[in-house]
Amino acid sequence: MKRHTANQVRGANLRVEETPRFSVVLFDLDGTLIDTNHLIVTCFQYVLKEKLGLDVPPEALYKHFGEILPKTMSRYCPERAIELADFYRAYNIANHDRLIRRFEGVSEALAQLRRAGVKLGVVTSKRRDMALRGLQACGIQEDIDVVVGMDESEKHKPAPEPVYLALQRLGAEPGDHVLMVGDSHFDILCGKNAGVRTAAVRWTVLDQAELEAVSPDYWVETPAELVRLILGQ
């Protein structure tokens, strides 16, 4: 399959293919479809300060984005990881809708992909109930066909199981017709381990060097550019 770099996709006037280049697209949620960066940092800082007396700058927290919550908390206090995770979730729930928003262009991109017949799923390291709440709060829940949360699989990103589960629910198989889109190296490795193509988004706040190190198949600058990639324009 011929691959295009982000520069080749952006601004290209290519013929639209009769069918999309990718018939199934799986998205990470936080940092990819929904801007939860401020929410996540606020929650971590509050919990770590209140429970452990730690002042942790945002840059130190970004590298944990995409991990499941208990694993991140175990890095700061292994013996209290579950307690810290529960405290985080309670604070997150209380402040969730106030501090999140969707990225510009995401709603329009999802709607265009649905019109083109692309099957859309979310594979997230959040619990399913909070993932659904975030999608609903940002007005994009109806655009997503399936959601796989961290509480629905035994293994998590970067293991391939969450992608396999999403594809099973969509009635699809892994392959070059599937694209995994994310903002962290966990997302890219999850897609690669599942045998699907991968795309990294440039609007991530995470260290892009870590993303480059895992060699995503594509880079995209904007949701509109992502649509062009998926549809083969």
Image (cartoon, helix red, strand yellow):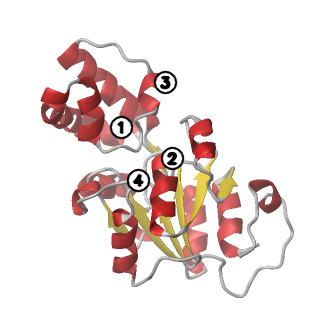
Mark 1 and mark 4 residues within 8 Å of each other at the beta carbon: no
Q: CA distance from mark 1 to mark 3?
A: 22 Å
Label 4 element class: loop
Q: Which residue is mark 3?
A: 59
Q: Give the camera-side residue of 130 and 44.
A: 44
Label drawn at residue 158: 4
Q: CA distance from mark 3 to mark 2?
A: 16 Å
Q: Earlier in the sequence, mark 3 or mark 2?
A: 3
Mark 1 and mark 3 residues within 8 Å of each other at the beta carbon: no
| Position above or below: 101 against 120 | above
Mark 2 and mark 1 residues within 8 Å of each other at the beta carbon: no
Q: Quadrant of residue 53?
A: top left
Q: Is residue 77 left or right of residue 121?
A: left
Residue type for callout 3: Glu
Q: Earlier in the sequence, mark 4 or mark 2?
A: 4
Q: Which residue is mark 1?
A: 98
Residue 141 in view in this figure: no
Within 10 Å of the Cα at label 3, are there few (<14), some (14-19), or many (20+) other Cα atoms?
A: few
Label drawn at residue 185: 2
Residue type for callout 1: Arg
The residue depicted at 24 percent of the width and 32 percent of the height is 74
| Position above or below: 115 against 185 | below
- Comparing labels 2 and 1, the label whose residue is closer to the camera: 2
Mark 4 and mark 2 residues within 8 Å of each other at the beta carbon: yes
Q: Earlier in the sequence, mark 1 or mark 3?
A: 3
